[in-house]
């Protein structure tokens, strides 16, 4: 099998797995309890908070553990806009943001949607036109999950802060893959999910800048300083910190490797004379390749490649039941005769050059038939 859908989820790191086993079977105490047996669990939480903070340029007390990127996005959107504040977001956000915004619209909030260029990039002049004195929160993702385009978050956040507006970014596709520093980006909140950077599923975090006025997301106990109640998943949290730290340590090497794999696929298809368009900007997440093939169907390509033992996506895996053209591909105006033939190949650090070449051969064979 060739697994090339790492934007959907990644393989669990072995060291992260071993850490999980230790906290699931040995140091399994509830970190909120005062007795000695819970000390290791409590210590692991604080060490994980410190590691994650170090990886993104934050302070440990600014890291809040969640069940993943979806919860982090929901928290930022639903609790960051105040009682009636206006929200501005982009048309290519993940559905965790878009559906949260739609929920806010249903309860009376005004939501405005930023268009993007044909490369899938938000323009700062469009943001300046949309914000008003009522705007309370702006949410623009750091990197798009379908086409990989990296957004000018720092410039957008500066515009927001000149007007006293909170800025949130969904960094689920970026954390652990490109340099992320919350101070340099100047964001107030940032979402991340462990299973996108070789951590376990069902765990993530939300960075909340110290002093940010935001309501708690879950009511109950005093966990996470009273902002997110519920006994912490210590095993998954410790594993997440381990995986993020390892990916950040080898980031430069990983990025170079992924760019080589990208080049093999794109140049290989060109050499074979395949008619396709590559979607997204030149400034994109390494390893994320969105391709639209002329007069083809993405679902057909996915199924034929699956029969050859190759796993890719037709777009966002989180919307896998919907075979229509995705909202991202529509937003960047991919020509109709190409749009339906869109697939996403997303490599990870364990993919090889031989696997990239095999994907080129498989696509050439399927499209030729």
Image (cartoon, helix red, strand yellow):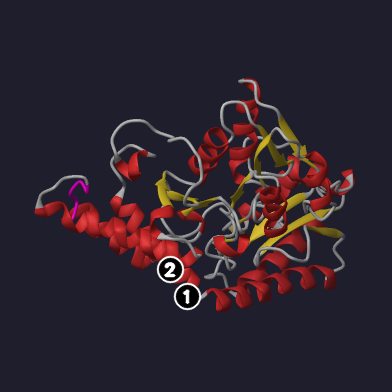
Q: Which class describes the residues within 10 Å of circle 2: few (<14), some (14-19), or many (20+)?
A: many
Residue drawn at the location 64% of the way across and 32% of the way down? 101
Residue drawn at the location 61% of the way across and 76% of the way down? 257
Q: Disc 2 vs disc 1: Cβ atoms closer than 8 Å?
A: yes
Q: Could you tell me residue 354's position as x and y percent?
A: 62, 75
* Quarter of the view holding residue 267: bottom right
Q: Give the camera-side residue of 53 and 262.
A: 53
Q: Which mark is residue 249?
A: 1
Q: Which mark is residue 340?
A: none
Name the quarter where the N terminus is drawn.
bottom right
Q: Give the camera-side residue of 93 and 14.
A: 93
- Which residue is labeled 2 in the image? 245
* Above or below, comparing residue 295 to residue 348 in the picture: above
> Magenta span covers which residues?
27-31
Q: Residue farthest to the left? A: 36
Q: Can residue 216 be seen?
A: yes
Instruction: Describe residue 80's horizontal placement relative to residue 32 as left or right.
Output: right
* Helix, strand or loop at mark 2: helix
Residue drawn at the location 81% of the way across and 42% of the way down? 330
Q: Give the camera-side residue of 39 and 99.
A: 39
């Amino acid at each position: 099998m060739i697994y090339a859908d790492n934007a959907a989820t990644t393989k669990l790191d072995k060291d992260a797995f071993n850490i999980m086993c230790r906290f699931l079977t040995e140091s399994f105490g509830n970190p909120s309890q005062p007795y000695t047996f819970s000390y290791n669990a409590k210590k692991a939480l604080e060490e994980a908070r410190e590691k994650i903070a170090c990886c993104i340029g934050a302070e440990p007390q600014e890291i809040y553990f969640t069940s993943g990127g979806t919860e982090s996005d929901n928290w930022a959107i639903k609790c960051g806009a105040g009682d009636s504040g206006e929200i501005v977001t982009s048309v290519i956000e993940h559905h965790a943001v878009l559906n949260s915004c739609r929920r806010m619209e249903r309860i009376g909030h005004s939501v405005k949607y930023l268009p993007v260029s044909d490369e899938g990039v938000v323009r700062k002049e469009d943001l300046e036109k949309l914000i008003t004195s009522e705007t309370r929160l702006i949410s623009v993702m750091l990197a798009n999950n379908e086409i990989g385009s990296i957004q000018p978050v720092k410039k957008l956040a500066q515009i927001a802060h000149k007007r006293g507006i909170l800025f949130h970014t969904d960094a689920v596709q970026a954390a652990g893959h490109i340099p992320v520093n919350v101070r340099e980006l100047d964001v107030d909140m940032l979402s991340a999910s462990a299973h996108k950077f070789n951590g376990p599923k069902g765990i993530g975090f939300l960075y909340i800048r110290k002093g940010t006025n935001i309501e708690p997301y879950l009511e109950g106990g005093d966990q996470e300083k009273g902002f997110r109640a519920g006994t912490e998943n210590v095993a998954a949290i410790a594993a997440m910190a381990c995986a993020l730290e390892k990916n950040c340590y080898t980031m430069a090497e990983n990025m170079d490797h992924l760019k080589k794999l990208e080049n093999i696929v794109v140049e290989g298809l060109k050499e074979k004379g395949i008619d396709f368009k590559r979607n997204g900007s030149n400034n994109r997440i390494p390893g994320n390749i969105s391709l639209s093939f002329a007069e083809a169907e993405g679902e057909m390509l996915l199924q034929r490649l699956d029969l050859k033992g190759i796993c890719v996506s037709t777009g966002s895996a989180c919307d896998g039941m919907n075979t229509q053209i995705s909202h991202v591909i529509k937003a960047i105006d991919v020509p109709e005769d190409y749009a339906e033939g869109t697939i996403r190949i997303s490599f990870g650090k364990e993919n090889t050059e031989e696997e990239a070449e095999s994907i080129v051969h498989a696509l050439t064979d399927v499209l030729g038939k």
